Image: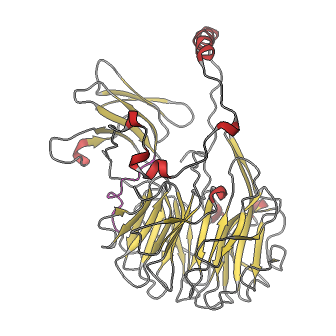
Amino acid sequence: MLNSPQFCRGARSAGAAVLLLIAAPLAAQRAPRPAAGDRPAYDPALYTDGTRTNSALKSLRWRLVGPFRGGRSTAVTGDPTRPLVFYFGAVNGGVWKTTNAGQSWENITDGKTDLSSVGAISVAPSDPNVIWVGSGEGKPREDITYGTGVYRSTDGGETWTPRGLANTQHITSLRVHPTNPDVAFVSALGHAFGPSPDRGVFRTTDGGATWKKVLFLNDSTGAADISIDVTNPRILYASMWKFQRSPWGMDAGAGRSGLWKSTDGGDTWAELTFNPGMPKGLIGKIGVSVSPANGQRVYANIEAQDSLGGVFRSDNGGATWTRTNSEQKFVVRPFYYMSITADPVNENTVYIMNLQVSRSIDGGRTFTTVRVPHGDTHIMWVDPKNPQRLINGNDGGATVSLDGGRTWSSQNNQPTSQFYHVTTDQSQPYRILGAQQDNTTVNIAHRSDFGSITERDWWPVAGCENAYIAVDPRNPDVTFGGCYMGPALASRS
């Protein structure tokens, strides 16, 4: 993963002069920027209705070439009534469904919605045909993709309806009332690159027809997580987080970041940040999960200054807290991780997502690693009645377990890879080259003589995940690619 901003520092004067000479005539030919009032309103039908396509582009068709290797997923859920049915949302690839526990996946939003980036997904516990999706990824790394609000299906994903909150842009979690599929709560970061009033915690009681902003602190503090006490759904916990991205870095934590609780379904909120046992000093991002097995047991993974953060537990509904584990490996890169999930059956079992999945069976005191197919883990869904059923979302996609994490389904069956850069070579037929986020570079055929493009048709070339790739025009087997901190690499296929 790319941890530090990369800077390009100037060019030789001769190179700068060439750039100026080229830029000047281009600037003279550039059309004037239209006034804001002249821009057409956003119309999702342009992306879903083929009759609205510009006539000059009607003959063009997108064709999937692969590779079938999963990309980052921060949104997963399962059907609580059908043991082989699971869903995941890709940060740039819509919503996917499996009916065979991850052996194969089908996209259920392409061509039906303009949905691309998914930040949260939830199946209504009382009606598995009702699926809620919050768009816009909520793990705000450098290449974050914004969304267009909330979407809802009432027929298991066959059809979808936009349900508002388009300006929230980045939805971090979406929780549905345990007995009423029309009641849901959304936590939203809001605009990642500037102040915005469209952030905080939102509630709907009519299936998304209307929303009320029930927790808002200021225009620079969004909501990072929500947890509902399923034993008493009037009780909710929400973490608030001050955050703003810039092209070269970020400003995160402090300010009004902290933990809040409601006991009246979100009408009013009380702050827990300064309760006994909570870390002193500046607070950052918090993941929170109330145990479905014991509504008084609340877990929180807390970022705090001077290594005062860690895993915290309350046994009295947030009134007082104890730091059960102080290992800082659970708060590495908090803007990207921090998710915590309480087991629904055993109040002493809890999962933490970070570079890897960690599980505690002694109330958060000690943890062991649960090995999943790919690192950089973001979210875990646990079946509310059968905790052996799991689905994990990570930088390699989504993966399913039916045996409590001992074995997992493949992630090499999801064409959801994120590519930072792409290019082509001069082979006949030509090949496509790119660099996949948190994975290798790829050199893949644009067609195959074997009926489908499979793993036999692609391989890694020069460079790392962030690489620009260049191909020797005289020999397409020779490639050059960049890597972290500036080195250039060469490869011969």
Left/right placement of residue 274 relative to residue 347 reads right
Residue 417 in the magenta stretch? The answer is: yes
Type of secondary structure dominating the magenta stretch: loop
Between 456 and 97, which is closer to the camera in this rendering? 97
Left/right placement of residue 411 relative to residue 38 reads left
Between 21 and 362, which is closer to the camera in this rendering? 21
Q: Check the image and name the residue furthest to the left.
A: 450
Residue 123 in the magenta stretch? The answer is: no
Across and down, in percent, residue 372 comes to: 42, 66
Depicted 425 relative to depicted 315: above or below: above
Q: Looking at the rendering, in which quadrant would you find the C terminus?
A: top left
Residue at (55, 31) in percent of width and height: 486
Between 293 and 416, which is closer to the camera in this rendering? 416
Across and down, in percent, residue 339 comes to: 60, 68
Residue at (80, 79) in percent of width and height: 268
Residue 272 shows in this picture: yes
Left/right placement of residue 330 relative to residue 412 reads right
In this picture, which residue range is highlighted in magenta?
Answer: 409-418
